[in-house]
Image: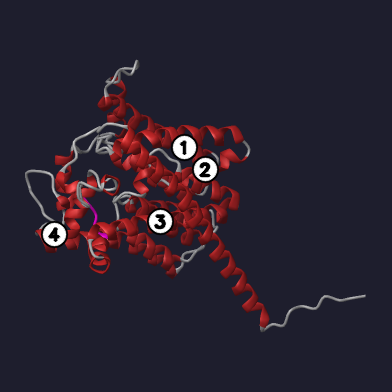
Amino acid sequence: MTIDLPAPASDAPRSRSEATSRTWVSLLASAVLMFVVWRGTLFAFDLFGLSLTPGMGKCQPNWQVFGPDHPLLNGFFRWDSGWYLNIAKRGYRYHEDGTSSVAFYPLVPYLARYLGSVTGGVPVAALIIVNAATVGAIYYLRRLGALLYGDAVGKLASILLLVYPTSLFLASFYTEAPFVFLAAASMYFYFRERYLLCGVFGCLAMLTRSTGLVLFAAYGADVCWRLYRRETRLRLSMLSLLLIPAGLGLFMFMQYYQVGDALAFSKTMKYWGRHPAWPWAGIVDALHGTYFDFPVNFKKTQRFLDAAFALVFLGIGAAMALTRQRVALWVFVILGMLLPLSTYALAGMNRYSLGLFPAFIFLAQLCQARPALERWLIYVSSLFLAVYSLRFMQCGWAG
């Protein structure tokens, strides 16, 4: 007869540490592999697509960052990328009677500026930042899904994020990849009740895009609900969550220092076609102006699709609330849609929805018992991803 003896006390912490290390390394390796497969596939598609399709828009000179002989690399720098490049090179500029760079948040362009001094230029640094951030987004989205609902949900949520119609922005010089990475990391540490790390990542997310405020509101609602249900108690460490709005304060200070107006970022919004409105106003006008036989009219069709994306994600947020998902998850999705909708303009709604990562966790849950839904989502998403990716590469508007 043999008796299993417990491991010595001195060995136990080391064993747990090794197990944690192996888990961390394996999840990161899996994230890198998923990124390589996704990026390689999309890269090959863009390469052949550039040769097989005509131009879909006029390319501005400041989008040709690697010169006219490198259309594929230039294809990752379109539209808003020009503004981020301008901030990275020159800092903020404010024109009171027109569009200005003050509308864009500072973390990504300034990282590109300082990393560019090491890599030999801002464009190279920009590609390193967004692609590394995409790996981070895959990693933390999977960990968040696994923490709440199991690894299968976390893994599928990452796949659904990568095949989403506007996931092309995860590889372009935009803020989507850094924001999803930082916000997902923040929420992961929030649910682990490691509030200092949650606040630090949330602060960085706030410096990436305005949706950082939604992250703070989601945590506030979740804390209040848990206090009401007596599922937690107030802790001094929860004050770390205030680092998130502090990020907005830092952004305002930067603008005051550089252009003399701490509110310049909000004052310039009217020149971007944004003004206060009821959240449904833009959607109603978009649907009213849609030709439902869908003739060749990109502007009207895209406006309809932006309205559809908004409605779908509002519906997902409502379904998350009705099925009693964690409050922070569904509040983030709903407010993340209502924030841009409250400015009337629908342009870019398909891209903004990419940042509402808890929705992908919910969709992954639904797909667990519905394999047909998973296949349908991947097929439809990939179809639109192909269309938008080609448009973006060819200087057409994609979101």
User: Are the two marked residues, 1 and 2, in contact with CB atoms closer than 8 angstroms?
Assistant: yes
Q: Name the foreground residue: 112 vs 269.
A: 112
Q: Residue at x 76, y 78 (%)?
A: 6
Query: Picture coordinates of residue 9 (x, y %)?
Result: 69, 82
C-alpha distance separating marks 3 and 2: 18 Å
Q: Which residue is mark 3?
A: 181
Question: Going from the N terminus, do you reach mark 1 or mark 2 first?
Answer: 1
Prevailing secondary structure of the magenta residues: loop
Camera-side mark, 1 or 3: 3
C-alpha distance separating marks 3 and 4: 26 Å
Secondary structure, mark 2, is: helix
C-alpha distance separating marks 1 and 2: 8 Å
Q: Which residue is mark 1?
A: 316
Q: Which residue is mark 2?
A: 362
Q: Name the foreground residue: 90 vs 222.
A: 90
Check the image and name the residue furthest to the top. 293
- Label at residue 90: 4
Q: Name the foreground residue: 223 vs 271.
A: 271
C-alpha distance separating marks 2 and 4: 41 Å
